[in-house]
Amino acid sequence: MIIQNRLGLLEGVETLMAQENRLNLVSNNLANADTTGFKKENVTFWEMLYKASDKRDRVGKAARVITNHQAGSAEQTGNPFDLAINGKGFFRIQTPQGLRYSRAGNFLRNAQGQITTGNGDLLLGQGGAITVQGSKVSIGSDGTILVDGQIIDQVAIADFDSMADLEKEGSNLFRLKEGATKEKAAENFELRQGYLETSNVNSVEEMTEMIDLYRAYEAQQKIVRTVDELDDLAVNRVGKLTA
């Protein structure tokens, strides 16, 4: 009886922790609902078999975070350094930590004329970092950059055989997982100058899920308390004799 209750208590606590992780993800999604190019995250659960002791196996629950790469909508800004990718692909970004990828196209031109992210990381073209020296900047649908009528470079757009090869790093950046297949040149995409891709977070859906999670968490708390009370009754009645 006590062993069974302890197992139930363990299962209840594991579920509470999983629900808490889901709630943290939903909160992060909501916090980034207005972040350019942000991709929301979801949690999936599956059962796994692991060693509970030397003598027996146990089936437990595991959680996996999955990034939803569905494209957001395109919002017109009129800023010549704002870019949105229509189709598959990522901007190649050079950071102090190495090459990274992003769908956020809200770029700036720094004092040296380089096109950068808001954090100062460099947008890469076919010839490396893109430097714009001139007044009239035009970027074609294939990424070709014209400055005062002269072609200077082409925005490099990368793609991957599997989105599972990418993992989030923060600051709206992705990196390749260790051992993942290398990038390839993107095809069948359209670059839109003066537009930004919005977040793919649906605030109404996330709020609804948050309410459901709160209710599920409360229900699981009641289960844990019930199991704990059963344990208490089992312990207090051990050794007692009935009349």
Image (cartoon, rainbow, N blue to C red):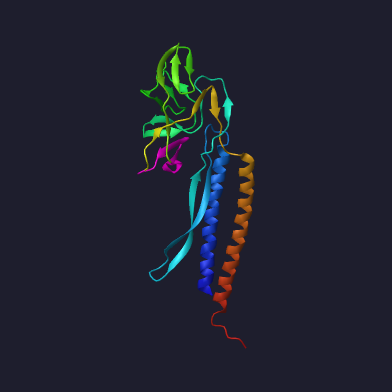
* On screen, residue 4 above or below 143: below
* On screen, residue 80 above or below 233: above
Residue drawn 49% across and 31% down? 104
Magenta stretch contains residue 21:
no
Residue drawn 40% across and 34% down? 100
Closer to the camera in the image, 199 or 121: 199
Residue 20: x and y in percent read: 54, 52
Residue drawn 52% across and 38% down? 39
Residue drawn 54% across and 38% down? 70
Give the residue at the far front of this rendering: 188
Residue 95, quarter of the rendered image: top left
In the picture, measured across the screen, residue 79 lies left or right of residue 153, that is right
Residue stretch rendered in magenta on the structure:
162-179
Residue 213: x and y in percent read: 60, 51
- Quarter of the image that includes the C terminus: bottom right
Residue 155, quarter of the rendered image: top left
Magenta stretch contains residue 178:
yes
